[in-house]
Image (cartoon, rainbow, N blue to C red):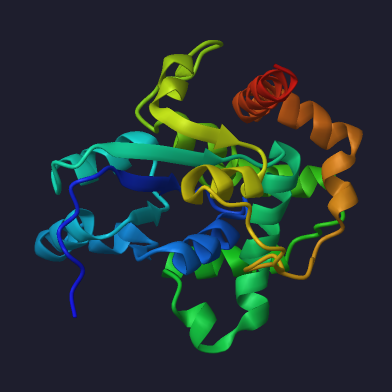
């Protein structure tokens, strides 16, 4: 009834919010036994160790350094780490929209979120989200939820970012891509079957707000580490395809 203890590498997927990570998890669940949202077990060391020793894959909303520390204390298995990036403008727009979506869904789903997130969702709904300046103010009020989120997850939240900070940590990844199918294929060895995107939400904000000149200037300055990391990953993927 229980999986046997594994001796081979443990597949680890760093799941950055709103980057199609839930879709990747769905494909991995069809491939082999695993566990998403491993962060739920941070305070349950016995269950965490059992999962880390016996499952084929684990994913979670944890930064690279957090994931390595958590699993390093739970298992002696080597880790093979995978990550996925999304266009940074699309990702931050989706993250903003998700905070609107949770209130739109309401009921038990909304109540299941922490009170500060519910308060923020209420505030965003009361905002003039057609005004780029207002959206920028809302982002700046909670920068940890929005700005450079992908870089902080994929390179580690223990870094003080500068122009080249964290580049060496890219070598931690067996595959870091901008294409979810490539990540799934790298892990499973098979091209994933076409599937609808999981955890997608209707938009409650006009996405053109994030293309406005004022917003673009703001993102180039305050969101630049995500933008630069995304460009680097794109270049490296293009170089591999062209070789």
Badge count: 0
Q: Image quadrant for the N terminus? A: bottom left
Instruction: State the image coordinates of residue 145 (x, y, percent, origin top left).
Output: 53, 48
Picture layout, residue 145 above or below residue 204: above
State the image coordinates of residue 66 (x, y, percent, origin top left): 30, 40
Quarter of the image that includes the C terminus: top right
Query: Who's the residue at 81% across and 36% down the image?
Result: 215
Relative to the observer, which residue lies in front, 161 or 195?
Answer: 195
Asked if 209 appears above or below 222 in the picture, the reply is below
Q: Quadrant of residue 72?
A: top left
Task: Identify the residue shown where x is 60% and y is 66%.
Answer: 121
Return the residue nearer the eye: 18 or 103: 18
Q: Position of residue 161 (x, y in %)?
A: 48, 19
Classify residue 2 as left or right of residue 123. left
Question: Which residue sits at x=90%, y=32%?
Answer: 213
Residue 132 located left or right of residue 21: right
In the rendered image, is residue 222 in sight?
yes
């Amino acid at each position: 009834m229980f999986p046997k203890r594994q001796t081979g590498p443990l597949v680890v997927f760093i799941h950055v919010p709103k980057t199609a990570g839930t879709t990747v998890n769905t494909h991995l669940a069809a491939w082999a036994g695993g566990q998403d949202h491993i962060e739920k077990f941070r305070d349950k060391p016995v269950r965490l160790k059992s999962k880390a020793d016996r499952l084929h894959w684990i994913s979670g909303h944890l930064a690279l350094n957090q994931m390595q520390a958590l699993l390093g204390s739970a298992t002696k298995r080597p880790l093979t780490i995978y990550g996925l990036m999304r266009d940074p403008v699309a990702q931050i727009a989706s993250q903003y929209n998700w905070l609107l979506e949770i209130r739109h869904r309401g009921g038990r789903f909304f109540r299941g979120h922490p009170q500060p997130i519910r308060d923020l969702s209420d505030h965003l709904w009361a905002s003039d989200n057609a005004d780029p300046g207002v959206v920028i103010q809302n982002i700046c009020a909670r920068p940890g939820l929005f700005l450079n989120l992908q870089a902080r997850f994929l390179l580690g939240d223990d870094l003080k970012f500068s122009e080249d900070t964290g580049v060496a940590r890219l070598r931690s990844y067996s595959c870091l891509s901008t294409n979810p199918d490539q990540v799934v294929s790298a892990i499973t060895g098979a091209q994933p079957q076409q599937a609808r995107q999981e955890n997608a939400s209707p938009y409650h904000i006009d996405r053109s707000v994030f293309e406005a000149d004022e917003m673009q200037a703001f993102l180039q300055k305050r969101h630049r580490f995500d933008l630069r990391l995304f460009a680097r990953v794109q270049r490296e993927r293009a170089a591999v395809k062209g070789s």
